[in-house]
Image (cartoon, rainbow, N blue to C red):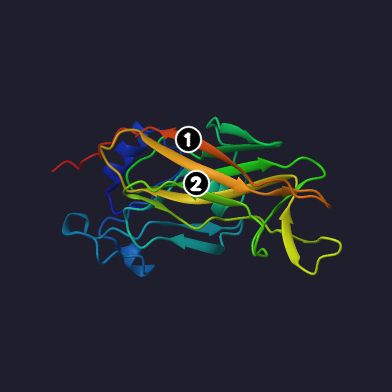
Amino acid sequence: MSYDSVEVLSGFAAKYAIEYPLLSDEGSAVIRALGLLNEQAAEQVAGIPHPGTFVLDGDGTVRSKHFYESYRERDTGAGVLDHLLGLDHASDVAPVQANAGSIEVRAWLDKPTYSWGQRLWLTVELDVPDGLHVYGSPIPEGYYPLAIDIEPVDRIIVGDMQLPEAQPFRVEGLDEAFVVYEGRVRVTVPITFMLVDAGAVELKLRVSFQACTATDCLMPESALLVLDVPEEPLVERPKPKV
């Protein structure tokens, strides 16, 4: 749904081979009726909605809504498939890989390039060999939980890390309670790029953890991964004829 005219949307759809229907809400009547009007938007984009997505089931019933405050922030198509629809969309971006001890770590974004205001999802996977586990949080003092630290970059917003559910674990002879991850562990982090004309960005992340068996703990390990993220060329918006 857009406040652009049918003519503008038709040109946009033809240029980018968009095959699904686009709703022209010229005058923003539907946007207002749904309570989506962005009243803080600048005058040159007056009538624009808050960006977001309605998730409908097969009967057309709205099951969830995902919207952002600023019109500058938007999901990628892959992000919608993975995180709003839960379809586990296979990314076509080659992962960056590293080994830390016996554990293989890899990371990738759901899109090979970034655009201004776009929210990309960083995925980090660990393959934990059979017989080992890595600690989660909360954890007793003196142990090291799985952590992902992303080096700050100006005007890049890193969201909250989303972890799978950890399993309870007890060490025989200890009163302390632990939670652990086993097998393939997948962590996702939303990252919003508020950059324009900045060129390629180097995204550095350190994945830290402590692996243990049922009886012995190994020394804490970490892996440094670097993702080179090019900037997508700015797309010129089709302008309506006067």
Query: Is residue 141 found left or right of 11 in the rendered image?
Result: right
Q: Nearer the viewer, residue 99 or 66?
A: 99
SS state under label 2: strand
Query: Is residue 1 found left or right of 185 in the rendered image?
Result: left
Quadrant of image for the C terminus: top left
Q: Quadrant of residue 127?
A: top right
Indicate which disc residue 128 carries.
Answer: none
Residue at the disc numbered 2:
121
Residue 125 appears anywhere in the view: yes
Indicate which disc residue 226 carries.
Answer: 1
**Identity, as a three-letter code, of the amino acid under mark 1:** Val
Counting every numbered tag in the picture gives 2
SS state under label 1: strand
* Residue 4 percent coordinates (x, y): 27, 50
Q: Residue at x 20, y 59 (%)?
A: 42
Q: Is residue 144 above or below residue 108?
A: below
Nearest to N terminus: mark 1 or mark 2: 2
Q: Nearer the viewer, residue 68 or 98?
A: 98
* Residue 164 percent coordinates (x, y): 66, 55
How far apart in space, not on screen, are marks 1 and 2 (Cα)?
15 Å
Query: Is residue 157 found left or right of 217 in the rendered image?
Result: left
* Residue 36 percent coordinates (x, y): 36, 65
Q: Is residue 110 above or below residue 142?
A: above
* Residue 98 percent coordinates (x, y): 60, 33
**Identity, as a three-letter code, of the amino acid under mark 2:** Trp
